[in-house]
Image (tube, rainbow, N blue to C red):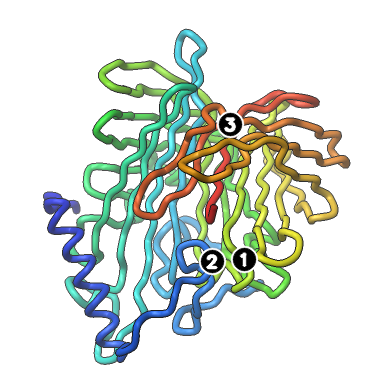
Amino acid sequence: MKVKALPLVIVRLQIVVLLMFGLMLSGCDDKPEEEKGFAGLADDASNYAQVTPDKRFVFPDDHAPHDDFRIEWWYVTANLKDADGQSLGVQWTLFRNALPRAKGLQGDGSGWSNRNLWMGHAAVTSRDDHFAAERYARGGVQQAGVTLAPFAAWIDEWSFSSQSANDDPLADMQLQASGPQFNYRLHLKATKPLVLQGKQGFSQKSEQGQASYYYSQPFFQAEGSIEIEGKTYQVSGPAWLDREWSSQPLTDNQTGWDWFSLHLGDGAEVMLYRMRQKDGEPYLTGTWINADGSTEQLAAKDIELAPEDTTDVEGRDMPTRWSVKIPSKAVDIAVEALNPQAWMNLQIPYWEGPVTLSGSHEGVGYLEMTGY
């Protein structure tokens, strides 16, 4: 059951204190080392559970948090159009991050014994505007979390919650979030089953073996309303849920990633991950999702992915137009940002926004670029 949200300034203070408390209990007297990779995701993860290729996914259980792993997220993007055909994008994300288990503390219960920190990101994007907001919470006080019966993921008043009473709690969902300049409320209905990414959900991110557990629901259809700076739009279009958890998805040599979720006009879906490296070629992987929901893993040799044009975004040279080729599927497309200035100017900044497809296939999708 949710409780009244704490004032944001108190929440942020709690997080800072909790971080300091965790460091002290871990016996860390020296200055912390500089984070490795994007958001420290290449830091040592030996104190956490490890991703291995032999996991058997169990649903609905795996919709819930996996507290022994360091990082996980519930991630929704939607490519929408209003009644006049205007393109709009929506993002909703809940991140869970676990502190190392400190000496003397047992379990992951309520109050200060809970190791989880929570962060929410939400955004709306049009051709001319991009607005983003964030929320923070600590675990153990019911300000944020994920429950299974019924399924609900929330942080403060933002929520992604089930409207379904059948065996698939993600079949019928309500999504809502707000920021100073925007507000949205969407109804999402799944038309096909979930998809396991990689090798039966084991998604490798490097030649050294870094990986995540990863599944998606790329077959949502969304409808509802978006309010931007006081104007309301009735919208509909495809949406995509990503679920990942890991403890070390990057290597010391990897600085960030470029992630694509693409809805092709013929009903197929494509997921692509490009992990950039300080030295050497990027690590490239993906999944081809047929219109009937069956999948085929894509290796680097199956994909040709390259930036074609860049945009100055907040002083960064960001690739906002890409060439994507999958010869075995006769795919030769340009992927272009709807709004090149879709910068998530938050505590952990990155680029995230809707894209349009042209060439051999029409369509829409989302692009996320981190570590720039």
Mark closer to the chain start, 2 or 1: 2
In the rendered structure, find residue 337 and report the number of the disc placed on it: 3
Viewed as shown, does residue 220 lie left or right of 166?
right
Please name the residue shown 27% across and 35% down the image: 179
Mark closer to the chain start, 3 or 1: 1
* Number of marks drawn: 3
Q: Is residue 331 above or below residue 348?
A: above
Q: Which residue in the rendered view is the most extreme toward the front?
A: 315
Mark closer to the chain start, 2 or 3: 2
Quarter holding residue 182: top left
Q: Which residue is mark 2?
A: 37
Please name the residue shown 12% across and 53% down the image: 6
Label 3: element kind: strand
In the rendered structure, find residue 277 and report the number of the disc placed on it: none
Instruction: Mark 2 and mark 1 in contact? Answer it, CB < 8 Å.
Output: yes
> Which amino acid type is marked by label 3?
Ala
Label 2: element kind: loop
Q: Which residue is mark 1?
A: 254
> Which amino acid type is marked by label 1?
Gln
Rendered location of residue 160, percent (x, y): 35, 43
> Which amino acid type is marked by label 2?
Gly
Please name the residue shown 64% across and 30% down the image: 336
Rendered location of residue 241, percent (x, y): 50, 44
* Crowd rating for badge 3 (residues with CA inside 10 Å; few <14, some 14–19, many 20+): many
- Mark 3 → mark 1, Cα distance in angstroms: 24 Å
Quarter holding residue 162: top left
Rendered location of residue 184, percent (x, y): 33, 29
Rendered location of residue 240, percent (x, y): 53, 39
* Crowd rating for badge 2 (residues with CA inside 10 Å; few <14, some 14–19, many 20+): many
Q: Is residue 364 above or below residue 319?
A: above
